[in-house]
Image (cartoon, rainbow, N blue to C red):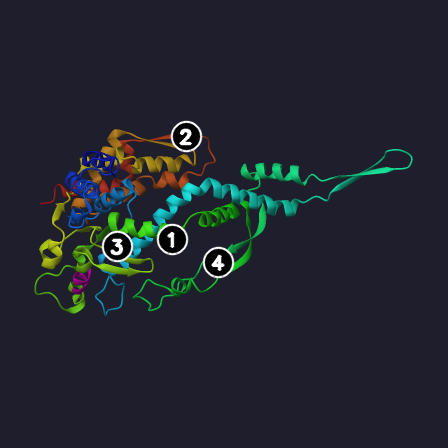
Amino acid sequence: MELMTPKEIVSELDKYIIGQDRAKRAVAIALRNRYRRSQLPENLKEDITPKNILMKGPTGVGKTEIARRLAKLVRAPFVKVEATKYTEVGYVGRDVESMIRDLVETSIRLVKDEKFEEVKATATNNANKKLRDILLKSHKKPAQTTTTNKDDNSIEIVVQDESKSDAEKLLKEVEAGKHDKEIIEIEVTEAPKAIEIIPGTQDSNLNDMLSGFLPKRKKMRKITVAQARRNLVHEESSRLIDMDAVNEEGVRRAEQEGIIFIDEIDKIAIARGNGNGPDVSREGVQRDILPFVEGCTVNTKYGLIKTDYILFIAAGAFHIAKMEDLIPELQGRFPIRVELENLTKDDFFKILTQPKNAITMQQAELLKVDNIDLEFEEDALKEVARIAELENENNENIGARRLHTIMETLLEEISFNADGDYPLSKVKITRDFVLKALESTVKKYDITRYIM
């Protein structure tokens, strides 16, 4: 985080997200401010809290992707939650506190993965030795004896034990993966089954509560050497790392670096004078979210966690409700407001060609598996972008997700007939191919131009 300036953060986001410069700038500044805060004296640090962000924009324009990519840039704990899944205390549904518990779990898993990487080489080496010992038992050869006459009165008996040389040879073979498909029998730990205490209201389960008292259940299973290696590497890694230190670091990161993305927040906003009927608990959910955004202490199975320094990013389309329909106290905790723009045909064309994970690249790589070398002409992609803009204008605006619908329709025939039985074939997608494949859609919008 300390090595990235706001400009560099925006530059990284540009590799995956087209447009939405204001939103990118806002999150880049928020992220850099975390580093700035970390460099201050302790007495100043306590008083500086993150400036939470509220995004407004239709679905598919990049709200969630901006927050997710931001978290990936700095390996920060990140959770995305849907505001509509929560209910006011007293109603059946998830309680708001569970978002903090989810963040802590994510943070600890992130730290655990990092520690596992540090000890992976040692753990893999130990696992391969255990696999070698298991395979030696199944491959074990009886010792061979030979007798020789030394003279007329004595006989020399030589026992040839090749176990040591066999073990060294077998270990090299295991490390090279030559036995990966071989079936062996090994003892594995059973995963605990989650049991909700009060269905629909709590995320905790009895296994978490009793994990310190009940021994882990194990059973013998017949699995491949490759699967056994994965299990053994995980077990060896768990032995090599200090889980108490992992949990402590995970809680610290969740507190200081955590990001919670609250989607569909407009669905719990209520227009004034409309707070009854099925919407009765919506304002209650807002009031339940408020303490966590303001800063409070939550009790988790890993200990207490303060929410004061967690960055909250809320987002919604706000088609029916407005930002001002949220309760004033909640509005005040999201001082940074960003309105994301609708995507145009130029944006769609850039989305098809510029990002590292562009949908055209994904489709080409998928079809390459079946010996289809897919190539898109520029005019063809411009036509796809034009049709996507028309579809969003005349139907529901689903943003960049419209491109997935169009591309699937466009390549349906090719994908269906590709089976890999033929040598590598080059297929060029031209503008005429697009017009023919999307003929019904194009005709529909050509007709609407002449309707008054």
Say which residue appears at 14% left-offset and 51% top-offset. Answer: 334
Q: Amino acid at mark 4?
A: Glu
Under tag 2, what secondary structure?
strand
The C terminus lies in quadrant:
top left
Say which residue appears at 17% left-offset and 59% top-offset. Answer: 290
Residue segment shown in magenta: 284-289
Q: Nearer the viewer, mark 1 or mark 4?
A: 1
Inter-mark Cα distance, 2 to 3: 44 Å
Can you identify the residue that label 4 sits on? 190
Indicate left or right for 412 with 152 as reference: left
Inter-mark Cα distance, 1 to 4: 22 Å
Q: Nearer the viewer, mark 2 or mark 3?
A: 3
The 10 Å Cα crowd at callout 1, few under 14, some 14 to 19, many 20 or more, is few
Residue 90: x percent and y percent?
23, 70
The 10 Å Cα crowd at callout 3, few under 14, some 14 to 19, many 20 or more, is some
Give residue 244's mark: 1
Under tag 3, what secondary structure?
strand
Mark positioned earlier in the residue sequence (1 or 4): 4
